[in-house]
Image (tube, rainbow, N blue to C red):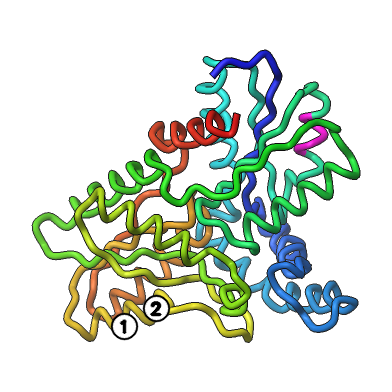
Amino acid sequence: MNTSKKIGVLLLNLGGPRQLEDVKPFLFNLFSDRQIIRLGPAFLQKTLARIIAHRRAPKSREYYRRIGGGSPILEKTREQAQALEDILGQEGDFLVRPCMRYWHPFAREALTEMAAAGVDELIALPLYPQYSLATTGSSLQDLYQTQARYGPDVPLREIRSWPAEPNYIACLAARIKEGLHRFGDQPVQLLYSAHSLPVRFIEEGDPYVTDLEKTIKALEEQTGLKGELCYQSRSGPVQWIGPSTPELLARSAAAGTSNVLVVPLSFVSDHVETLYEIDIEYRQMAADLGMRLECTRGLNDDPLFIDALRNLVRTSL
């Protein structure tokens, strides 16, 4: 890949509160996004989002307090951005920056930096391997709307999904091998855990579950191991796709399982869903059921995963 252009790469991610004081406004931003959660009629969305954020903030603050007082997602995404910029820099002039959906740096901040740097072209690279309207779709729509309003007026390429990117799969496979090693020679059940999604999204044609199945197929072809898919992080009074991770843990215990290795598929860096929900909440849940639960390490800035991101950028160009 050779290009004389200055290319800006935006790593799209959810974002997260960096300190406990950020939790309530972060939740407000999240629940204000009507693409994810439709709270009554549109004109009431922000009012209801404010009420829900106020009610949920104390519980959410406790989660973040338990993992160090804030989300590490920006720090981890910045590390991924720097690693990707370094490796792309061997082939051209690239600027790689995080672009978060619900907390800083928002799209306007990221695009302002890209404009100041004089980029000739932009690439939107979502850190969601599996496409969903609630993640990639919402982030891309926000990015397009922000660019139209604030610039820069340059071409914008988008990478929509990459559920079976070879090096992403290889990195996951290596994490599974590493995780299984912790159990020695004992039998272990693999659970693939992904962020849940309201059923209505799937009924309306969202390809998220299909993309997850592509990831699992590619992963099992490489490892020769079988696992079960389950979903975590449900919230709100709607019907969610299942089975939930707690449901599958209970089912596994009832079947006599002693050891469980959870493999997060839709999260590519450490954040509250892995550090608290899996490592603390589900681990204790499994222990109460008489099982040992371990979770594979986050992909973060693993060189093999960064190479996967480089391949995506190269292919888009």
Q: Quadrant of residue 259?
A: bottom left
Q: Is residue 57 left or right of residue 215?
A: right
Q: Which residue is mark 1?
A: 250
Secondary element under disc 1, as helix, strand or loop, is helix
Above or below, 44 relative to 92: below
- Between 313 and 95, the residue placed more toward the observer is 313
Quadrant the C terminus occupies = top right
Magenta segment's dominant SS is helix
Q: Residue at x 71, y 79 (%)?
A: 55
* Part of the protein shown in magenta: 110-114
Of all residues, the one furthest to the left in this rendering is 185
Q: How many marks?
A: 2
**Residue 157's spot in the image, x, y percent?**
68, 37
What residue appears at the point 79 percent right and 47 percent down from the top-left corner? 144
CA–CA distance in space, label 2 to label 1: 6 Å
Q: Which residue is mark 2?
A: 246
Q: Secondary structure at mark 2?
A: helix
Label 1 near label 2: C-beta < 8 Å? yes
Q: Residue at x 52, y 54 (%)?
A: 271
